[in-house]
Image (cartoon, helix red, strand yellow):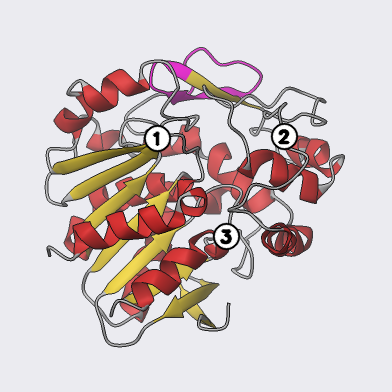
Amino acid sequence: MESIEHRTVEVNGIKMHIAEKGGEGPVVLFLHGFPELWYSWRHQIVDLGSLGYRAVAPDLRGYGDTDAPAPLTTYTCFHLVGDIIALIDSLGVDKVFLVAHDWGAIIGWYLCLFRPDRVKAYVCLSVPFRPFLGRNPRQKTVDGFRALYGDDYYICRFQEPGKMEAELARVDTAYLMKNILTTRKTGPPIFPKGEYGTGFNPDTPDTLPSWLTQQDIDYYVSKFHKTGFTGGLNYYRNLNINWELTAPWTGVGIVNVPVKFITGSVDLVYNSPGMKEYIHNGGFKKDVATLEEVVVQEGVGHFNNQEAAEDVSNHIYDFIKKF
């Protein structure tokens, strides 16, 4: 996208690729999820950058044109948050407006928990505070582990290095990205062993939806062909150690950062058992005392920053312009 500039910065011992638009305005920092890239925020970078903000979106550690360290143990929550703190420092600002989705949202919650002094306000997409934080993913382990999503589980086979990579390698990357990005299946995503002909989206459309182009798919494919999926999978492989490392914060919620939460009505996380009750019946607000607003986008799926891009951009702007 012509108006977006790209450069590499040194952060926390790695080289990180960032995309940005805008100059002197307040920084809006966007964190992507799995299996995504800075590119997932292409619309919001342009929109917020055109409104006087400095919009910045990195490829997170292990993704795209950012370094992917080999050791599995370099993908803990402390490494990931350390990258973001160093990135904020490199931008020459004390605080940022934070916007994050999926795994980026989890990093965002950790950032608000560990370093609320660096965040002006947080717009969180898809994943509320509850998952992965203060929960023991070793409980009721099946085929490696199950990462808690409310009272149900995100079943995966990510724990053993190389195993998931080998299974994904048997599937065309373009099909895999299309399969994941277009999913409308509600409930926890399930990656069944050896069944990547359907992945977790058996209803993959023959044609792309209006919000996703072949050019978009091609960009993702070009980067994942280069890097593979190991970096992103290593985030999941550190869930157990993250739970141990964050023991000092057990029972601690978000109290110093204003928060807005946006999800789609057919988002797979939102439709996980117990999640709607948690979000709407007081549990979320109890854990995040500064939660100001919950937005549910009707008919929108998990990748709402792409599927409902303009609406998401408007929601972000309406929230952060108050601060």
Q: Secondary structure at mark 3?
A: loop
On the image, which quarter does residue 181 sit in? Answer: top right
The one nearer the camera, 191 or 217, is 217
The one nearer the camera, 144 or 51, is 51
**Residue position marked by numbered label 2 in the rendering:** 204
**Residue position marked by numbered label 1 in the rendering:** 298
Residue type indicated by callout 2? Thr
The quadrant in which the C terminus is found is bottom left
Asked whether the residues under the numbered discs 3 and 1 touch, taking CB atoms below 8 Å apart as contact, a structural biologist would say no
The quadrant in which the N terminus is found is bottom right
Q: Position of residue 214 (x, y in %)?
A: 73, 59
Residue type indicated by callout 1? Glu
Residue at 45% from the left image edge and 21% from the top image edge: 272
Instruction: Give the spatial CA distance, label 3 vs label 1.
Output: 25 Å
Q: Earlier in the sequence, mark 2 or mark 1?
A: 2
Residue type indicated by callout 3? Leu
Can you tell which of label 3 and label 2 is closer to the viewer? 2
